[in-house]
């Protein structure tokens, strides 16, 4: 696939060629007015460049990042500042086997290696700046589960435990790919050949039922910590296993739109505001606090929390409302009401995220009364006579009939 820089070079070459031929191209022509064949070619060059640049930027907003060289204490810090820590000791750098069984291309990549004893458990934690930092759908790639010890099939039955910080449910995982003997349930992963007793090699991976098992699982949910335990299937022995982690920090990204259908006209009038809050991030937002100095009443959440968990999910839209304080004489003189709404919120583990803000300017439309047919008829008689007239007949206010 051609990359952005290659395409940019081609575009520059095309532009230089056109200038050499003394073809003057205006911006007007480039966007579609009376373009020559050469100009069409140049536009065809730059439009894909713009699209590729946009897509490259969009795809970089949130993506799983691969772990690399871990230290001897079982720590690795990703480029985004998140640190993954695995409890315990005995860690060394390993390398995945030269296979293509994982959901990513990981053949020979650096891994975290350790030998796990029967029923041993290790806790995997994610932090940023020294505080817990949830990750969205972290992926665990595993190499070399099981093998043969003293002629008997033996393997760890890796079990997952932990809690989704948003739903409160127990964590589960999904098999993404793996060798034919990479057996996965919602909370376990193991070497099927150890269960069947068909393993016939020690410590060698392969996509068959005789060698050790390898594969990829995705933890489905949002978590800052989970635990893997290693009960051993077999009569004795330990199991040397390697891991590569892919992680993506859980970062909600809220935006707010403020609206009113009220048309203010005079001092003392109030406005009814609605606030629409959406989440374009990769995780739910917690601890929402919405403030607006123009609101005289409490800002109410009218709708949107579909599951009632107090987290603004990326699939939800929350609607708030309030009634404003009265319009002031100074605002009438200025001809508008200007104010800003601010939404403060946290990520799923309680870390503050940048505020979402928007400013609404509402024009004040003065009352304009246009009078028509307001001649009062003569009174019938000098004494006791009477006559009535509606001064609003045929009149209008701001162009709308009032009678």
Image (cartoon, rainbow, N blue to C red):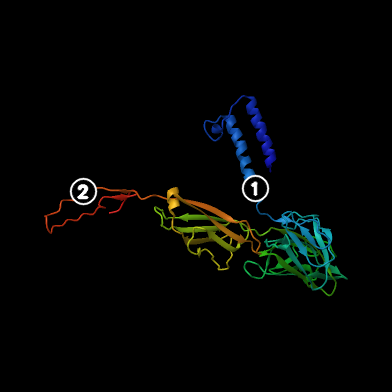
Extreme-right residue of the structure: 150
Q: Nearer the viewer, residue 166 or 140?
A: 166
Local SS, label 1: helix
**Circle on res. 375:** 2
Q: Visible in this render: residue 178?
A: no
Q: Nearer the viewer, residue 372 or 43?
A: 372
Counting from the top left corner in percent of width and height, residue 64 is at 70, 56
Q: Dots 1 and 2: beta carbons under 8 Å?
A: no
Q: Nearer the viewer, residue 82 or 370?
A: 370
- From the viewer's perspective, tell me whether residue 152 is left or right of residue 84: right
Task: Please tell me whether mark 1 or mark 2 is closer to you in this view.
Answer: 2
**Circle on res. 57:** 1
Extreme-front residue of the structure: 383
Residue 329, placed above or below residue 52? below
Local SS, label 2: loop
| 3D distance between C-alphas at marks 1 and 2 | 70 Å
The quadrant holding residue 159 is bottom right
Counting from the top left corner in percent of width and height, residue 381 is at 11, 55
């Amino acid at each position: 696939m051609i990359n952005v820089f290659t395409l940019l070079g081609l575009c520059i070459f095309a532009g230089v060629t056109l200038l050499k031929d003394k073809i003057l191209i205006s911006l007007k022509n480039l966007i579609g007015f009376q373009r020559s064949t050469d100009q069409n070619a140049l536009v065809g060059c730059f439009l894909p460049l713009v699209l590729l640049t946009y897509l490259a930027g969009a795809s970089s907003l949130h993506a799983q990042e691969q772990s690399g060289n871990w230290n001897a204490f079982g720590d690795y810090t990703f480029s985004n500042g998140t640190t993954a820590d695995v409890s315990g000791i005995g860690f060394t750098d390993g390398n995945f086997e030269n296979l293509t069984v994982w959901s990513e291309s990981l053949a020979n990549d650096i891994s975290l290696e350790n030998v796990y004893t029967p029923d041993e458990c290790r806790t995997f934690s994610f932090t940023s700046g020294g505080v817990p930092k949830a990750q969205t759908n972290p992926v665990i790639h595993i190499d070399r589960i099981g093998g043969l010890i003293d002629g008997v099939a033996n393997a760890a039955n890796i079990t997952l435990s932990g809690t989704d910080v948003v739903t409160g449910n127990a964590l589960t995982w999904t098999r993404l790919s793996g060798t034919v003997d990479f057996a996965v349930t919602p909370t376990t992963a193991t070497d099927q050949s150890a269960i069947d007793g068909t393993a016939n090699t020690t410590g060698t991976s392969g996509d068959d039922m005789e060698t050790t098992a390898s594969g990829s699982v995705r933890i489905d949910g949002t978590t800052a910590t989970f635990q893997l335990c290693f009960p051993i299937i077999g009569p004795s022995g330990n199991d040397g296993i390697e891991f590569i982690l892919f992680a993506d920090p859980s970062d909600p990204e809220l935006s707010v739109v403020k609206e009113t259908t009220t048309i203010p006209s005079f001092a003392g009038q109030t406005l009814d505001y609605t606030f629409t809050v959406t989440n374009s991030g990769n995780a739910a937002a917690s601890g929402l606090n919405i403030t607006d100095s123009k609101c005289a009443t409490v800002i109410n959440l009218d709708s949107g929390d579909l599951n009632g968990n107090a987290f603004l999910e990326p699939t939800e839209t929350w609607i708030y409302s309030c009634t404003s304080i009265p319009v002031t004489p100074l605002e009438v003189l200025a001809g508008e009401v200007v104010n800003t709404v601010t939404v403060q919120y946290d990520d799923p583990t309680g870390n503050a995220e940048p505020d979402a803000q928007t400013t609404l300017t509402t024009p004040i439309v003065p009352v304009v009364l246009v009078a028509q047919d307001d001649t009062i008829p003569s009174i019938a008689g000098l004494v006791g006579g009477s006559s009535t007239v509606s001064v609003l007949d045929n009149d209008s206010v701001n162009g709308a009939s009032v009678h």
